[in-house]
Amino acid sequence: MHELDLPRTYRTIFICDSFGLGGQREQDAEALRRCHRHLAPGGVLAFSLELPYSNAGNWANWLPEERRHFPKAWPAGGERRRTADGDELEQRVRLVDLDPLEQQTTIQMRSTLWREGQRVAEEEYTMVSIRYFRNEVLLLLEQAGFGEVTVYGGYSDAVATAADTLIVFVARKAG
């Protein structure tokens, strides 16, 4: 998103569950600046953000004594989903690193294709992401040029509260 360079402007830009996946704060800030640049006057940027405390079981990983156990072991098995042709796709995820000062997590994902009970293919990816809190994102949006920003709790029309673990930002470009 930090390299977004399109030939025109838009009334709406959606970022679906992927803000912060670049793993670098400056790239995230640049992504918001470029979204602002690509919006028509009065246009809206909308995106969701899972808050760092969304999974209570993972919150302990921020503590020094837990970080000594990185990388975590691969789970024995993962969630399998059947495809239209009867094959199964299995995905397993493990936490490799977490830097609480930088609010940066590194995970590895392993995807396996199963056919008639036999492993046919397997791919592994590493993903680094920045974990943001609401006020950090509000500041980034302001620095990118957005003036009017509303934060909703989840995918609802209710204003976000401390009970929400997924929030949606709707930022409007002046115009």
Image (spheres, rainbow, N blue to C red):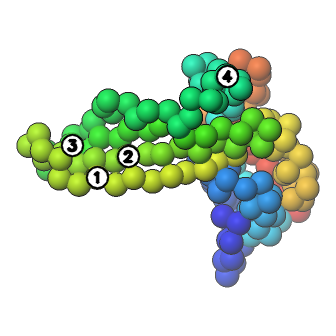
Tag of residue 110: 2
- In the rendered view, tell whether residue 104 sits above or below residue 65: below
Foreground mark, 1 or 3? Answer: 1
Measured along the vertical axis of the image, is residue 41 above or below residue 64? below
- According to the picture, the residue beneath numbered tag 4 turns out to be 65
First of labels 1, 2 by sequence position:
2
Residue of label 1: 122
Whichever of callouts 2 and 3 sits on the residue coming sooner in the sequence is: 3
User: Are the residues flagged by discs 1 and 3 in contact, CB closer than 8 Å?
Assistant: no
Q: What residue is disc 3 on?
A: 88
Secondary structure of the residue carrying tag 4 is helix
Question: Which comes before the other along the chain, label 1 or label 4?
Answer: 4
- The answer to whether 123 appears left or right of 15 in the picture is left
**In this rendering, is residue 30 above or below 57?**
below
Look at the numbered discs 1 and 2 and tell me whether their residues touch, using CB distance below 8 Å.
yes
Residues at marks 4 and 2, CA–CA distance in whole angstroms: 26 Å
Residue at horizontal 64 percent and vertical 30 percent from the top: 67
Amino acid type, label 4: Glu
Residue 103: assigned label: none
Q: Tag 2, which secondary structure?
A: strand
The image shows residue 91, relative to residue 59, as above or below, that is below
Q: Residue at x 84, y 51 (%)?
A: 141
- Expressed as whole percent of the image width and height from the top left, the position of residue 76 reads 32, 30
Callout 3 crowding tier (Cα within 10 Å): few <14, some 14–19, many ≥20: some
